[in-house]
Image (spheres, rainbow, N blue to C red):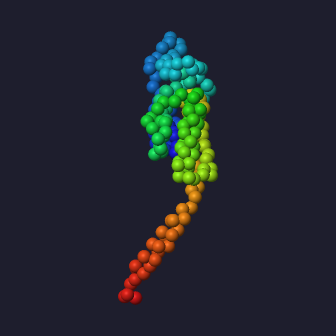
Amino acid sequence: MTIGPVGSGLYNAYTAAAASFTPTGVTGSADRVQESKPIVNPGESTEVQPGRKSSPAECKTCAERKYQDGSDEMVSYKGATHISPESSVSKVRAHEQEHVANAFSKAAKGGGKVLQASVQIKMAICPECGRAYSAGGTTTTKISYPKDPYSQNRKSAESLVTAGGNFDKAV
C-alpha cells in the first residue's frame, strides 16, 4: 500500500538532474553569455537558488515527476499521474487515507477490528531546483478477526484422518 514517484526503486539525484537539463539556446552579448531555458512550471519563481541548477519555474524534474499506486486495492493513482510539488503532500496523504478507509471497511465486512493503522509520508528535496515535495507514502494496517469455533473442530477432524498417512514399513 504505497504510492510514490514512478521509476526504479533507487533514485540517483545527480543522474536524474543531469538527464533533465536541456538548455534551449544562448542569448546575450559577446561580453555576457546567458543560457535561456523554457518555463515549464508557470507561476513559479524564476530565481535560481545558490547551489541549484535551475529555478522552480524552469525545473523539468518537477514538471515530469509522476506518482502511481503499487497496491492491489481499488484506490486513486492506479495510472501514473503528475502532482505538483506544492500539492503533493496533501494529495499523497489523502490517497493513503483511502487505504485506511479500505481497511476499516474490510474489517467491518469480516466482523474484525482494526488494531492499528498508520500512514508514513516520505519527503524529499528536488536536486535540480531545491523545492520540497512528497516522495510517496506507505500505509500499514493490522486487523484482528474473531476466532471461528468451527475451524478448530475441522483441524482436529483432519488430524484424525491424516494420522499415519506417512507410514514407512522399510524402517
Placement of 75 over or under 63, stated as above or below: below
Residue closest to the far top:
29
Placement of 95 over or under 155, stated as above or below: above
Say which quarter of the image contains residue 52: top right
Say which quarter of the image contains residue 56: top right
Viewed as shown, does residue 161 lie left or right of 144?
left
Residue 21 x, y percent position in the rendering: 48, 28
The residue sitting at 57% across, 53% down in the picture is 112
Query: Which one is in front, 113 or 141?
Result: 113
Residue 82 x, y percent position in the rendering: 48, 30
Residue closest to the far left:
170
Q: Is residue 133 visible?
A: no
Viewed as shown, does residue 123 lie left or right of 155?
right
Placement of 72 over or under 38, stated as above or below: below
Query: Which one is in front, 168 or 165?
Result: 165
Query: Which one is in front, 136 or 8?
Result: 136
Query: Which one is in front, 19 or 171?
Result: 171
Residue 126 x, y percent position in the rendering: 56, 32
Q: Quadrant of the C terminus?
A: bottom left
The residue sitting at 53% across, 13% down in the picture is 31
Q: Is residue 128 visible?
A: yes
Residue 27 x, y percent position in the rendering: 48, 14
Task: Tell how many labels.
Answer: 0
The residue sitting at 52% across, 68% down in the picture is 152
